[in-house]
Image: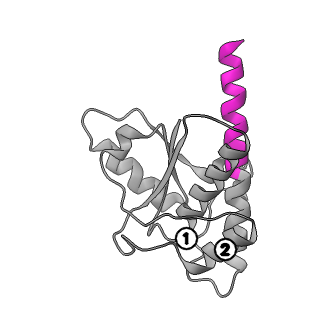
Amino acid sequence: MKVLFVCIGNTCRSPMAEAILKHLVFKRNLQDWHVDSAGLRDWNVGLEPQGRGQQLLKQHGLKTNHMSRMITAQDFYDFDYIFGMDNSNMMELQQMASQLNPSPKCKIQLLGSYIGRKEDEIIVDPYFSQGMGGFNTAYLQILESCEKFLLYLISTEEDVVA
């Protein structure tokens, strides 16, 4: 399984999601998973994720060694799932995919849609928030989304095997 998380600058939400899903996959001893993140803009290419996000991950016993990168056309062919964090990300991802030939087979989805509550499905960019409040909110939304995504995949696999 190959999963890519995407946000605007690949410095807050998507690297947190990458670290969280990697941890969940490791805890469940799931094999053959590749988890990565990328941005839609080149502002942070080659840089570490935002310090507040790294601090929050560390508080939860997680870490990241991710260096920011931009999404590429090849990513649409290499990954099974590409998750955007908000509607703007989704529109850009869908537009990029629509211009590719042949059409990619990856599923492009809003990560927060797995939460199942309309009011929580947009993971708001915490970059401009004061302090840690926005990062804490994003972390909890991402964690719940990733947990429910894994449960969805596991239940889908069980249905296929049954």
Q: Say left or right for 76 vs 121.
A: left
Disc 2 or 1, which lies upstream in sequence?
A: 1
* Location of residue 121 in the rendering, given as x and y in whole percent from the top left corner: 66, 56
State yes or no: residue 128 in magenta: no
Residue at the spot x=44%, y=69% of the render? Answer: 9
Question: Which mark identifies residue 12?
Answer: 1
What residue did someone put label 2 on?
135
Residue at the spot x=57%, y=80% of the render? Answer: 51
Q: CA distance from mark 2 to mark 1?
A: 8 Å
Where residue 13 sits, quadrant-wise, is: bottom right
* Location of residue 102 in the rendering, given as x and y in whole percent from the top left corner: 26, 32
Q: Which quarter of the image is occupied by the C terminus?
A: top right
Residue at the spot x=60%, y=51% of the render? Answer: 111
93 w.r.t. 45: above or below:
above
Q: In front here: 32 or 142?
A: 32
- Find the magenta span and give its range: 145-162
State yes or no: residue 161 in magenta: yes
Q: Main secondary structure of the magenta part?
A: helix
Q: Tell me if mark 2 has few (under 14), some (14-19) or many (20+) residues whose alpha carbon lies within 10 angstroms of its own.
A: many
Q: Say left or right for 58 vs 80.
A: right
Q: In front here: 137 or 147?
A: 147
Question: Which mark identifies residue 55?
Answer: none
Q: Say left or right for 73 vs 68.
A: left
In the image, farthest residue toward the left = 101
User: Under tag 1, what secondary structure?
Assistant: loop
Asked if the residues shown at circle 2 and circle 1 are in contact, with their CB atoms under 8 angstroms apart, the answer is yes
User: Under tag 2, what secondary structure?
Assistant: helix
* Location of residue 27 in the rendering, given as x and y in whole percent from the top left corner: 73, 45
* Location of residue 101 in the rendering, given as x and y in whole percent from the top left corner: 24, 36
Q: Amino acid at mark 1?
A: Cys
Q: Say left or right for 43 vs 58.
A: left
Q: Amino acid at mark 2?
A: Phe
